[in-house]
Image (cartoon, helix red, strand yellow):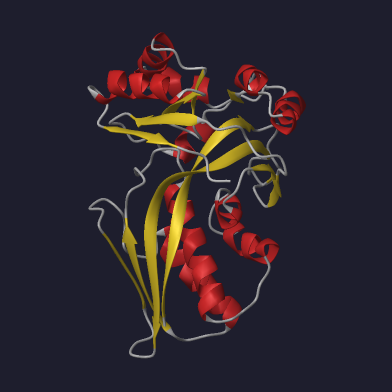
Amino acid sequence: MEILERAYAKLNLSLDTPYLHQDGQQEWDMFMVPIDLADSVTIRTTDEHQAIHVDSTSGVLPLNEKNLAYQAANLMRQRANRQDGVDIYIDKKIPVAAGLGGGSADAAAVIRGLNRIWHLELSETELARIGLQIDADVPFCVYSRPARVTGRGEIVTPIQTKLPPLWLVVSKPAISVSTPKILRQIDYGKLEHGDMPALMDALEQGDLAEVCIQMFNVLEPVTAGRYPEIIKLREKMQKFGADAVQMSGSGPTVFALSNKESRAKRIYNAVRGFVQETYIVHIIQ
């Protein structure tokens, strides 16, 4: 049987890590949104073989057990107690190593797809729990709607309020950032934490101006300290009239938020000349 799943990229409107657990894993408090920049993931089960095969349009993705979609298929086979072969084909549109959760989105797509193919009828909560074994962003990508994410990434609480219409200019500089390396550099004594309750209140009220004021990413100073390209990109987006500018995840992708399409296009045109991987996107709700 074959199924096609859309794997939507994510953006962090907020990202905080309040503390480290004793095992060295981060505690997270984030607000994330899926955007309509997406990979297409084709999942096919077969009795012709018992292997997991991954192929992709990307020349830089690993196609073995290091691939998160591969890991997802392996975990789902264990959960379902199946021996079927699984063929996965990823039509890659989300930039790699960008802070946009592309690998996690692909893994979540495989988890959702195999849940449907094998009629497992597992809940989103159960699927998110499986996804957490792969990466902290996979549970959110299972839900793939605007949500607050806490714990180690497994507690996903979608918001009920619809966000106002927004245009986002997403731009990934030609550098790759290693999330584990960035996380190892965090000095928890020096982190400047944002006001998450104030952001959530602004989101619930649909107050875009206040959302823009309260957005934050505690990893941005860490990553931007190593990669000055991020600061230059921020400054250019702000110069051309963005309502808010922020790095997503551990970077290096920076996004500008605007409530006017014309202004978003102006920012896009200003940035696209020197950053090739630049897109105008919308939030999926």
**Which residue is at a point 44% across and 32% down the rendered structure image?**
251
201 sits to left or right of 75: right
Residue 252 visible in the displayed image: no
In the rendered image, residue 272, in percent from the top left (x then y), is placed at 27, 25
- Seen at 65% across and 20% down, the residue is 214
- Quadrant of the image occupied by residue 223: top left
Residue closer to the observer: 83 or 167:
167
The quadrant where residue 202 appears: top right
Q: Left or right: where does residue 274 sit relative to residue 247? A: left
Residue beneath the point at 44% across and 20% down? 224
In the figure, 49 relative to 235: above or below? below
Above or below 85: residue 223: above
Q: Is 266 situated left or right of 133 in this image?
A: left
Residue at 33% of width from left, 61% of height from top? 90
Residue 119 picture location, percent across and down: 58, 81
Q: Position of residue 75 (x, y in %)?
A: 53, 71
